[in-house]
Amino acid sequence: MSDIILQDSEFVAQFEDCSLSPTHFNHRGHIRIAWLYLQNNVISVALDKLVTGIRRYAGSLDAADKFHYTITTALLQILVLRQAECKASDWLTFIEMNSDLVTDAEQLLLRHYRREVLFSDAAKAAWVEPDIQAFAAS
């Protein structure tokens, strides 16, 4: 839980100026920045900031090829639904209530996509609609 060390504002600032240590930007860090952007932005703005930010950050680490547009967008949509359900007021409460976003994200995504669709080159490059189940409140 390396993200406890950084306050939310520090985490966002360091992510945005690409000074965030990669140890803070594992899968949990990706979920955290998405959640933080959703706290202060409408979904479309949060998505734009998230995509732009991850691409910039990954580029600063010479890892631009790792960015996956559909996974990023789909996880943001899951976050929106989860936050509406649990109404957590802070990151640690949210992730404690939704730990499967960190421990089992691939399986969550595979409820909506066939593996070959989700991990296709097309899905990596741009948004691909779910081919099993749309994202909707349960």
Image (tube, grey):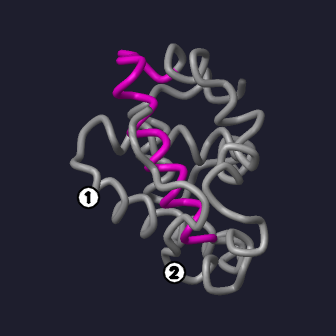
Look at the image and tell me in which quarter the N terminus lies.
top right
Q: Position of residue 76 (x, y in %)?
A: 46, 49
Q: Residue at x 49, y 39 (%)?
A: 11
Mark closer to the observer (2, 1): 2
Extreme-front residue of the structure: 132
Mark 2 = which residue?
126
How many neighbours does mark 1 have within 10 angstroms: few (below 14), some (14-19), or many (20 or more)? few
Q: Is residue 65 above or below residue 31?
A: below
Asked if residue 29 lies left or right of residue 18, the reply is right
Q: Nearer the viewer, residue 125 or 8?
A: 125
Residue 78 painted magenta: yes
Q: Secondary structure at mark 1?
A: helix
Mark 1 = which residue?
45
Q: Secondary structure at mark 2?
A: loop
Q: Identify the mark at residue 124; answer none if there is no mark.
A: none
Q: Residue at x 39, y 34 (%)?
A: 9
Q: Is residue 43 above or below residue 3?
A: below
Q: Is residue 44 above or below residue 60?
A: above
Look at the image and tell me in which quarter the C terminus lies.
top left
Q: Residue at x 34, y 65 (%)?
A: 48
**Magenta-colored span:** 68-91
Q: CA distance from mark 2 to mark 1?
A: 17 Å
How many neighbours does mark 2 have within 10 angstroms: few (below 14), some (14-19), or many (20 or more)? few
Give the residue type that dot 1 points to: Val
Q: Which image quadrant for residue 131?
A: bottom right
Give the residue type that dot 2 points to: Ala
Q: Position of residue 87 (x, y in %)?
A: 35, 18
